[in-house]
Image (cartoon, rainbow, N blue to C red):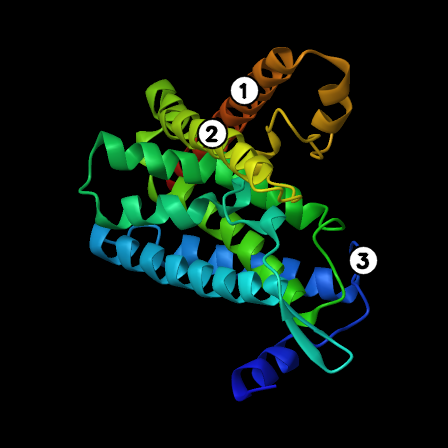
């Protein structure tokens, strides 16, 4: 075992797998709440340059942690022997991985409709995915300390950035702003579909027996997402896809209008307090 592999062995240290609302889970929930409040209070009226810096720093955190996760899922130490075997099921193109691909557009695009679309995506789809895992993380917890920390930071940061994007762009909330998120969601899911089909046939041609199911919409592997996992085996695949798109579109509008309602309510309270 070389020095690099020794470091990985340390980073692969184990713990008792946390459970929902254990001390480990609650600790990160409190950290997420604290970070969200801090950003939304101190940077709600920041300049675009500062906003971009916050997004860039967050992107770097996402990428570094994802690289660590990919290495740990590939590295295995057993009976004194180091083995490297890539876990294709963990390929970083899932719903929760989308900030890795979305944030650079937010950072480097100039202010306008296209940038608004990516920010809207962060404040609806990404926020929903982060909240879902942070409230019910049971399926993402494991016995590896580093991976548990990574997944809490990753999904917690989705919540922090999603809410911060809402507060930062609070003056732009209208129907069109909500629709813009779909302009990002559709091509991202389309790419996942292309990857699922192409990689499946490449694996089949090379006798590779691995699960590759990006966004859990592969026509070759069961969907394991809550609720959708019950629908997948009971309806034709095209119907499942339709339900998938409609379901997530509805979630997008729920989050959009809930945010708009809270923004309007906050403004009314401020006006009442100033009168």
Which residue is tagged 2? 189
Q: In this view of the protein, which residue sits in the foreground, 159 or 167?
A: 159
3 or 1: mark nearer the eye: 1
Closest to the camera, between mark 2 and mark 3, is: 2
Rendering coords of residue 32 (x, y %): 57, 58
Residue 80 location (% of width, % of height): 73, 83
**Quadrant of the image for the N terminus?**
bottom right
Residue shown at 44% from the left, 50% from the top: 161
The mark found on residue 132 in the picture is none
Q: Does 257 sit left or right of 238 as displayed?
A: left
6 in relation to 271, above or below: below
* Residue position for label 1: 245
Q: Mark 3 points at which residue?
A: 19
Q: CA gap, disc 2 to disc 1?
A: 9 Å
Evaluate if marks 3 and 1 touch, with contact meaning CB atoms under 8 Å apart: no
Compared with 161, 84 (above or below) is below
The image quadrant of residue 216 is top right
Residue 82, x across and y down, in percent: 65, 76
Is 4 left, or right, of 177 in this rendering?
A: right
* Residues at marks 2 and 1 touching, judged by CB atoms closer than 8 Å: yes
Q: Say if 107 sits above or below 22 in the image.
A: above
Query: Which element is circle 1 on?
Result: helix
Q: Tell me, yes or no, whether the two marked residues, 2 and 3, touch with CB atoms within 8 Å.
A: no
Please report whichever mark, 2 or 3, sits nearer to the chain's N-terminal start: 3
- CA separation, marks 3 and 1? 31 Å
């Amino acid at each position: 075992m070389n020095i690099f592999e020794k470091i990985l062995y340390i980073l692969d240290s184990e713990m008792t797998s946390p459970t929902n609302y254990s001390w480990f889970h609650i600790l990160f929930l409190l950290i997420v709440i604290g970070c969200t409040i801090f950003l939304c209070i101190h940077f709600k009226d920041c300049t675009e340059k500062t906003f971009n810096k916050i997004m860039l720093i967050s992107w770097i955190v996402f990428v570094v942690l994802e690289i660590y996760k990919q290495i740990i899922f590939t590295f295995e130490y057993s009976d004194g022997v180091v083995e490297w075997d890539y876990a294709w099921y963990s390929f970083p193109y899932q719903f929760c991985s989308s900030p890795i691909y979305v944030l650079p557009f937010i950072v480097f695009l100039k202010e306008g409709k296209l940038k608004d679309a990516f920010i809207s995506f962060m404040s609806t789809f990404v926020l929903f995915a982060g909240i879902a895992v942070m409230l019910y993380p049971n399926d993402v917890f494991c016995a590896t300390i580093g991976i548990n920390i990574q997944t809490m930071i990753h999904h917690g940061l989705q919540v922090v950035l999603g809410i911060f994007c809402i507060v930062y762009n609070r003056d732009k909330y209208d129907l069109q702003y909500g629709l813009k998120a779909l302009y990002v969601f559709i091509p991202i899911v389309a790419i996942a579909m292309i990857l699922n089909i192409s990689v499946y046939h490449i694996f089949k041609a090379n006798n590779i027996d691995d699960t590759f199911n990006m966004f859990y919409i592969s026509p070759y592997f069961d969907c394991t997402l809550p609720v959708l996992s019950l629908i997948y085996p009971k309806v034709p695949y095209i119907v499942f896809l339709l339900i998938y798109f409609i379901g997530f579109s509805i979630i997008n509008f729920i989050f959009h209008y809930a945010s708009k309602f809270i923004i309007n309510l906050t403004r009314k309270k401020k006006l009442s307090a100033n009168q």
